[in-house]
Image (spheres, rainbow, N blue to C red):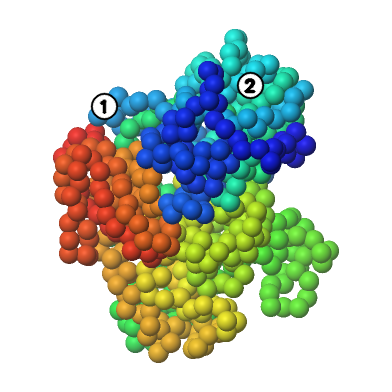
Amino acid sequence: MPNRLRRRRPDRILTCRSHGGAVPCNTAAISNSPASREFGLDHCDSAQSGPRIRGRGTVPRTRVANPSATVAPPTGDGRAHRAIAAAAICIVALLGMSCTSEPAPSPSPQTPESIWRDDVVPPEEVGADAESVEMGTRFSASSNGRITAVRFFREPGSDIDTVSIWSTDGARLATAPVTELRDGWQAVPLPSPVRVVIGMDYVVSYHVAEGPFPTAQHTFTEGRVVEHGWLTARRGVFTDGSGFPDEDGKGASYFADVVFEPAGPSLRPVDGGEEFYGSFTNSLPATPDFFPIGVWFAGVLSAEEIATDSSIGINTYVELTDDSDVELIADNGMFAIPSWGADHIAGRLTTDEADMWAGPGSAAWTGSTPPAVQPVCVPADAKCGFTVMHTLRNQVPPGIMVYANYGKGVTFWQSREDSARFVSEFQDVVSADNYWFTDGNICGESEGGALRTSGERALSDAECRLAANYGLTVRHVRSLVYPAGSKPVWAFVEVGHPTTSATDPSITGPQVRAAVWSSIINGARGIVYFNHSFGGPCITANVLRGTCGDSVRDDVTRVNEQIRRLAPVLNAPFVDGLARSDSPVDVAVKSYDDDLYILAGATQADPFQARIEVACAGDSTAEVLDEDRRVEVVDGVLTDDFADGNAYHLYRITADGSCGLD
């Protein structure tokens, strides 16, 4: 990072400014948080409307930055990546998935929004004069919509000549010249609006030909984000010269902004489409009442074992011991996805975690896999994971659904381009396993810290041992799928003690249930339980069948029964742009059988009361499923208590057709 972007005034208390002088802090509309203190806004009124800076520290309502992004396709040069990126929007639209076609009409006009309000003024922490630099903000929207203009804050004497909107792989989606300059906030209309799709990240930037630019050093540190309405700013970015700003600002904000018009509520099919599994030979059911609930690496030798697993709610075996009876599994109405070919299988597992044991690369593969001692790649220190996955994929007969699981390479350690290639190129269904509740290393700065704080620091237990992080893993993997939404992502949840260390924690029943629902809320289309305990008080190869599972079995059965009963809802379309919350909750909305289902899970460990705004709900009543209670929705706002980080609530609201959903 260039020295000018590190420039700070550590011995000075920063103050708010406006064109006419000092601005009272409560008009800046920034919450009283560690980030607000960096703005010199220690006494700002957090109830004020406008942008909200979320972060750890004194503010209990924490929102973790979502690293989701559109990624470059896994092969080809940069120009091809950008060309395919532009075309992918059309491809996804044709597939009927998350696309940029016109959404369902909104019941009322939507008010344009920006990340920062006009009365929010950057602190007096100005970057040194630049000869040529592109300054930007990476952001996303929780509603479909369009960008009609780019906003920026101009420092006196700054020559800003162009503004741009980019996809995260560097494709310029729109640009416009700056024809006149004035100090402070100004908006530059785009020649044509840029369509924005929910769940995808974008970059907005302005080019400084010469002169200073505004800088706030700690806006995005430690995973903080800035939220306003449907918009979330995730980090500041820049590049020397002109072009795509792809260098991380290390927590700094440069006040590049947009004018965003939300589209209103619209329907989005589940990833891959509702009938995805039906496109393969003898695969999983494509009926609305089936949701994959799998168990990892079981031995299945008898009908009694199958009956035990079925009674817990398992319907799929993902990987099997060599002596398992696949025909017996099929005869008993269950489904098998082993790593070897046979009649009666519903799919084929290629391998597990090749991103970790072979690495991202296309060197030659020896055919060796762990725990064999001989080298995996040629030469021995090379990376050959892409070769491994390509080879194993080609060994699967046409028409068979291909499944693969990845590990910490994809989620924490490898570049987005390499991770996206693993996730997108070699299988039809994909997952990645991160065991947030039990892994002794996952809270480190190079693992969980990489996903939640961009590697700035390790995570505290309150941040790390959190059910919401299972949803974060799903969201991250989904962000790597290219084209977006084109294949199902499944989630792994442990039910025992997956590490050999006796000092690592074991998962509890409530943690299992919360992790499962966090994964589903964030888009998982299947659940796989890691069913082994390699350490802890009870070591076993099958937690759920034996006494080692006594402490979690009832909770696993309970959540599986919820999934089974709600499968038609979970397979139904999402409703984007309908519900939002500034509280520490992940929220998803489903539309099924004339009802709206709002799925909400806590994203912080401490108790809190959530406020969820539901467009079109008006004054109504929400049934809280499986809790024998109801919650009143007053003027479109649902308010409910969340006891801790394992809390989740499933609401049903009878729709009256006012949302304009088809």
User: Is the N terminus in the top left, top right, bottom left or bottom right quadrant?
Assistant: top right
The answer to whether residue 536 is above or below residue 156 is below
Mark 1 burial class by Cα count in 10 Å: few <14, some 14-19, many 20+: few
The answer to whether residue 505 is above or below residue 559 is below
In the image, what residue occupies the spot 61% across and 28% down? 205
Question: Can residue 594 be seen in the rendering of this structure?
Answer: no
Tell me which amino acid carries mark 2. Answer: Glu
The answer to whether residue 113 is visible is: yes
Residue 190, disc: none
**Rendered residue at 47%/44% (across/down):** 32
The crowding category of the residue bearing disc 2, from other C-alpha atoms within 10 Å (few below 14, some 14 to 19, many at least 20), is many
Mark-to-mark CA distance, 1 and 2: 37 Å
446 relative position to 53: left or right:
right
Q: Residue at x 37, y 64 (%)?
A: 644
Viewer-nearest of labels 1 and 2? 2
* Callout 1 amino acid: Ser
Place residue 326 in its image quadrant: bottom left
Q: Secondary structure at mark 2?
A: loop
> In this view of the protein, which residue sits in the foreground, 242 or 219?
219
Q: What percent of the width, then of the height, locates residue 440?
A: 59, 73
Q: Is residue 326 above or below residue 644?
A: below
Q: Say which residue label 1 marks.
A: 108
Q: Quadrant of residue 109?
A: top left
Q: Which residue is mark 2?
A: 155
Q: Quadrant of the C terminus?
A: top left
Q: Residue at x 35, y 57 (%)?
A: 608
- Are the residues at dot 1 and dot 2 in contact (C-beta closer than 8 Å)? no
Task: Give x and y (percent) for residue 474.
Answer: 48, 56
Q: Residue 48's x, y, as percent?
A: 38, 36
Q: Nearer the viewer, residue 124 or 461?
A: 124
Residue 523: where, in percent of width, then height?
Answer: 42, 53
